[in-house]
Image (cartoon, rainbow, N blue to C red):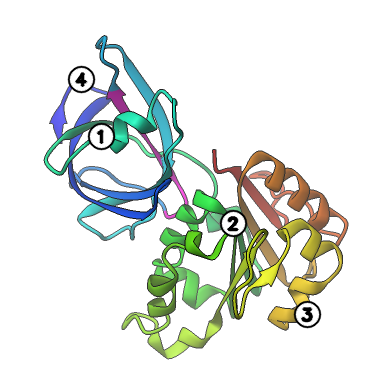
Amino acid sequence: MLALDAKHGTARLLSRRRWTPKLLSFRLARDPSFRFVPGQFARLGLRKPNGSPVWRAYSIASAPWDDHLEFYSIIVPGGQFTPLLDSLEPGDEIMIERTAYGFLTTSRFADGRDLWLLATGTGLAPFLSILQDEDTWRRFERLVLVHGVRESAELAYWEEIDALRCHPLWADVGERLAYQPVLSRDRSAGALAGRIPALLDDGTLEAHVGLRISPEHSRLMVCGSPDMVRDTHRALIAKGCRLSRLAAPAQIAVENGW
């Protein structure tokens, strides 16, 4: 990492992967001094043509031991940041703050048996990191990853998610993970149709996964659009769950994915 000042540095773009015309993941070289907890985000910066900086927060999708930092982004036409990001090539530099931020981490929960990870779109990113943490697999008996998108082409990382069950650090408990895609505008084998909040309201999601959400056993993390986070939070409140706070651990942790 090239130092810009005490708070900021730069990181080299290593690679890009295009999932759809609007979905992009990218990897940056990671300075050994950069530390994060799975579920946290980094602040990345680029310079506009006039030289002024523009910063955005991106959840880290990579494992805490990786020598790179991976991020998952939607390209917003006409936006201030993502068109600049989309124009970069490997070898280009991106500004990065030296500190990771955020509280969408499993440390928000004091206990719990089942961990539900509920995401839409690029809100999947922090859960990819959490599922690459051995403590997640050892601590919880059931792991349920639910990813809601509009069309099946947007189900990024599904092969990587499937491969997580065979990782040598936790392959002995790999069967603990259930992956459930949800499509709102498309149909595909194995995917539920609709929106995550509605599938929670009517019990379809729990029935399909074969696991009931309860305040006693369930711990739930939610990341996605503000509307999805709001509606999912309401659906979970209706099931008796409550927002977990540092001073009062409970069942739910939320973060807007954009």
Which sits earlier in the primary sequence, circle 3 or circle 2? 2
Pick whichever of labels 1 and 3 is earlier in the sequence. Answer: 1
Q: CA distance from mark 3 to mark 4?
A: 53 Å
What stretch of residues is rendered in magenta? 38-46
Name the residue beneath numbered marker 4: 5
| Residue picked out by circle 2 | 119
Find disc 1 in the rendering and name its residue: 87
- Distance of label 3 from label 2 (alpha carbons): 18 Å
From mark 4 to mark 2, how far is it between C-alphas? 35 Å
**Disc 1 versus disc 4: nearer the observer:** 1
Q: Quadrant of residue 77?
A: top left
State left or right for residue 203 relative to residue 98.
right
Q: Residue at x 43, y 78 (%)?
A: 162
User: Residue placed at 74% from the left, 49% from the top?
Assistant: 243
- Dot 4 amino acid type: Asp
Q: Which numbered dot is residue 202? A: none
Identity of the amino acid at label 1?
A: Ser
Find numbered disc 1 in the image and state the secondary structure of the residue it sits on. loop
| Mark 3 residue element | helix
Residue 127 is inside the magenta segment: no
Question: Where is mark 3, residue-wise?
Answer: 207
Magenta stretch encompasses residue 41: yes
Which residue sits furthest bottom? 172
* The one of 171 and 135 positioned closer to us in this rendering: 171
Binning the other alpha carbons within 10 Å of mark 4 as few (below 14), some (14 to 19) or many (20 upward) gives few
Residue type beneath disc 3: Ala
Indicate the secondary structure of the residue bearing disc 2: strand
